[in-house]
Image: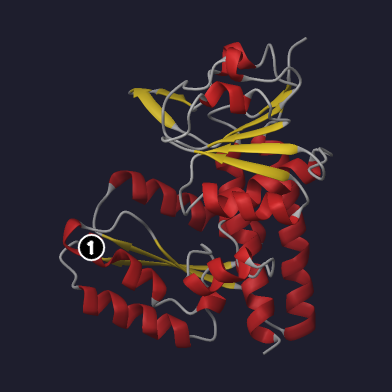
């Protein structure tokens, strides 16, 4: 039996419809349109595509959007001054610094991201937001893992009581995913490069989340029959060929449900950015 394919577009559209309604409600209640500012430093072509997609998605849901382009030779101080300005701007409720930054700023990445007001940190990377998530007080949560949770909820897939296994312990996906699943009453195991006999752990998973950046790493032999498999990886293996961290063709014959790559989790990330910006606006307006 072939797995149910969890198409990201279906769930992303549902989330965007909810966001549209929330924006209308905010306008009626406060007379405010949520605003997102994205800062891009330099000319990274992939970053430019991502930023254009975010800007277009804002327009789709009726949100105000500002793209701030800074030259590649901008100083850290110039970037921090721009963030400080946006922290004070009443029409901007979410701030996002597009990564990667130019090489001369890369060592200061944490300092730069931490300079964003935690209530405007729509990426959910600020230590205040990370700390709140870790104690079960979800404030602004990283978009990709939150998108995975929302997709499971919209798909009617129960999390409570399931054994969830995460491969990867990054601050962007693995660690927040752990806290989100734990708070929804899953029993959670986190695997990484030091995990011994990985396949014996993954074969116990009712829900497997993979985010390691290794193409087709997870094979059918590593999957419990009927398991739900969420593939967060996106790897370019040829100029026009993207694959995930999971061997999709193999695993779909064993799993109960699986996300494709492309067309899966990636589409939910931008939808959740819209969701987070509306949530951030509401947080700020209630202060």
| Residue at the spot of label 1 | 107
In this rendering, the answer to whether 72 lies above or below 126 is above
Left or right: residue 151 compared with residue 143: right
- Dot 1 surroundings within 10 Å: few (below 14), some, or many (20 or more)? few
Please give the name of the residue rendered at 60% of the width and 62% of the height, measured from the top-left corner. 141
Residue 237 appearing in the image: yes
Q: Position of residue 105 (x, y in %)?
A: 22, 64
Please give the name of the residue rendered at 43% of the width and 49% of the height, measured from the top-left corner. 50
Q: Which quadrant: the N terminus?
A: top right
Left or right: residue 151 compared with residue 243: right
In this rendering, the answer to whether 35 lies above or below 86 is above
Q: Secondary structure at mark 1?
A: helix
Q: Position of residue 223 (x, y in %)?
A: 64, 20
Corner quadrant of residue 129: bottom right
Residue 13 appearing in the image: no
User: Which of the two residues, 56 or 231, is positioned nearer the viewer here?
Assistant: 231
Q: Position of residue 87 (x, y in %)?
A: 45, 83
Given the current orientation, which residue lies at the most extreme front position? 196
In this rendering, the answer to whether 79 lies above or below 170 is below
Please give the name of the residue rendered at 71% of the width and 86% of the height, measured from the top-left corner. 286
Left or right: residue 43 compared with residue 143: left
Q: Which quadrant: the C terminus?
A: bottom right
User: Which of the two residues, 32 or 227, is positioned nearer the viewer here?
Assistant: 227
Please give the name of the residue rendered at 48% of the width and 80% of the height, measured from the top-left corner. 117
């Amino acid at each position: 039996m072939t797995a149910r394919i969890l198409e990201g577009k279906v769930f992303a559209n549902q989330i965007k419809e909810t966001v549209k309604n929330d924006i209308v409600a905010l306008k009626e209640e406060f007379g405010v349109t949520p605003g997102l500012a994205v800062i891009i430093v330099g000319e990274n072509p992939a970053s430019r595509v991502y930023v254009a997609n975010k800007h277009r998605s804002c327009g789709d849901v009726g949100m105000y959007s500002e793209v701030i382009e800074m030259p590649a030779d901008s100083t850290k101080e110039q970037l921090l001054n721009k963030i400080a300005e946006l922290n004070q701007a009443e029409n901007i409720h979410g701030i996002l610094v597009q990564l990667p930054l130019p090489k001369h700023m890369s060592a200061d990445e944490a300092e730069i991201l931490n300079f964003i007001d935690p209530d405007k940190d729509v990426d959910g990377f600020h230590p205040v937001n990370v700390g709140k998530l870790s104690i079960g007080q979800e404030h602004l949560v990283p978009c990709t893992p939150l998108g995975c949770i929302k997709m499971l909820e919209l798909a009617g897939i129960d999390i409570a009581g399931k054994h969830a296994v995460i491969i990867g312990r990054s601050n962007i996906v693995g660690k927040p995913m752990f806290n989100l699943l734990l708070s929804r009453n899953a029993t959670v195991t986190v695997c990484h490069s030091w995990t011994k006999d990985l396949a014996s752990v993954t074969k116990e998973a009712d829900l497997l989340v993979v985010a390691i950046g290794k193409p087709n790493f997870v094979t059918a032999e590593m999957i419990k029959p009927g398991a739900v498999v969420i593939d967060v990886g996106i790897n370019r293996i040829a100029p026009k060929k993207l694959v995930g961290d999971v061997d999709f063709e193999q695993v779909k014959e064993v799993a109960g449900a699986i996300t494709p790559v492309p067309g899966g989790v990636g589409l939910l990330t931008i939808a959740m950015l819209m969701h987070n910006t509306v949530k951030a606006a509401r947080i700020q307006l209630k202060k």
